[in-house]
Amino acid sequence: MFTGLIEEIGTLRHLSGGTTPRLTIGARTVLEGTQVGDSIAVNGACLTVTALDDRSFTVDAMPETLRQTNLGRLLPGSPVNLERALTPAGRLGGHLVQGHVDGMGKIVRKEREGNALWVTIAAPAEIMRYVVPRGFVAVDGASLTVARVEQDRFAVSLIPHTQSHITLSQQPGGYPANLEVDIVAKYVERLLQGGAVEGGKTGSVDWERLAQYGF
């Protein structure tokens, strides 16, 4: 489990393909206290450390992971957001992020407003159904507050500190961003649908139960 508060921006040093994809990432902060077998979120994807030294760590990634995230599109030298798994004593300053990427969006607009940077991301319908104004979304693993919502896109507004501590502000238009929606939204939806799944489809919303929870 992660918080979505990025600890540092690392650099992809090597990405091997084939049947056993492997990424080697240069880092410093996230190496502190890390051991083989620990989890590190790389652009929001939870991966297991398989080797490390004092300047980098290596993770194995399934081919499916590279297909469903932007990791397979990275090149040596690409910056990546990094966060170690949350410890019981850690502060939950963002929101609960699992490191399970739900899909990818695409940067469609970037604009300045004073010291803020607005970034608009187009996302598929299966993502947008869980995105609400003032709600949470993890973009490349960074916990961000949704400021605007349209039918097929949402926007976030980044303060200067966030701009300098995550990779999103550096990415160009068209960049494919990893997205993970708030897990709480998924559980609420399942609860309100009665929790039943028939034939691979969720049931309709249970409006009586909805009223019980004050919605």
Image (spheres, rainbow, N blue to C red):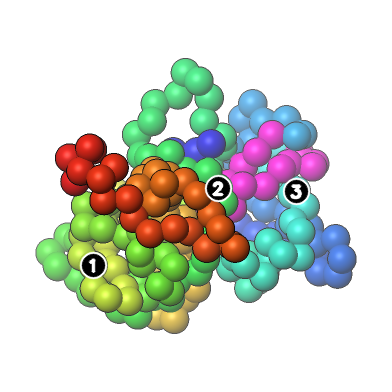
- Relative to residue 108, is residue 99 drawn left or right? right
Compared to 85, does 42 lie above or below? below
Residue 77's tag is none
Question: Distance between the Cα atoms at labels 2 and 3?
Answer: 17 Å
Q: Residue at x 73, y 30 (%)?
A: 35
Q: Residue furthest top?
A: 89
Q: Is residue 197 left or right of residue 170?
A: right
Q: Earlier in the sequence, mark 2 or mark 3?
A: 3
Instruction: Tell me the SS state at disc 1.
Output: strand
- SS at mark 2? loop
Residues under labels 3 and 1: Cα distance?
37 Å
Disc 1 residue type (three-letter) = Val
Residue to which mark 3 is pinned? 58
Q: Depth check: give the residue in front, 189 or 85.
A: 189
Residue 86 locus on image (x, y percent): 52, 31
Question: Count the marks: how many?
Answer: 3
Of 78 and 143, which appears nearest the observer?
A: 143
Which badge, 3 or 1, comes first in the chain's sequence?
3
Tell whether position 150 is magenta. Answer: no
Q: Residue furthest right?
A: 19
Query: Would residue 197 be found to the left or right of residue 144 on screen?
Result: right
Instruction: List the residue tagged with mark 2.
Output: 99
Name the amino acid type tagged 3. Thr
User: What is the x, y in percent for residue 40?
Assistant: 62, 42
| Picture quadrant where residue 93 is located | top left
- Secondary structure at badge 3 equals strand
Q: Position of residue 152 (x, y in %)?
A: 32, 76
- Residue 214 pos. (x, y %): 17, 40
- Range of the magenta residues? 38-53
Task: Give me the residue at 31% from left, 73% from top.
Answer: 153
Q: Which residue is mark 1?
A: 149
Q: Residue at x 75, y 34 (%)?
A: 37
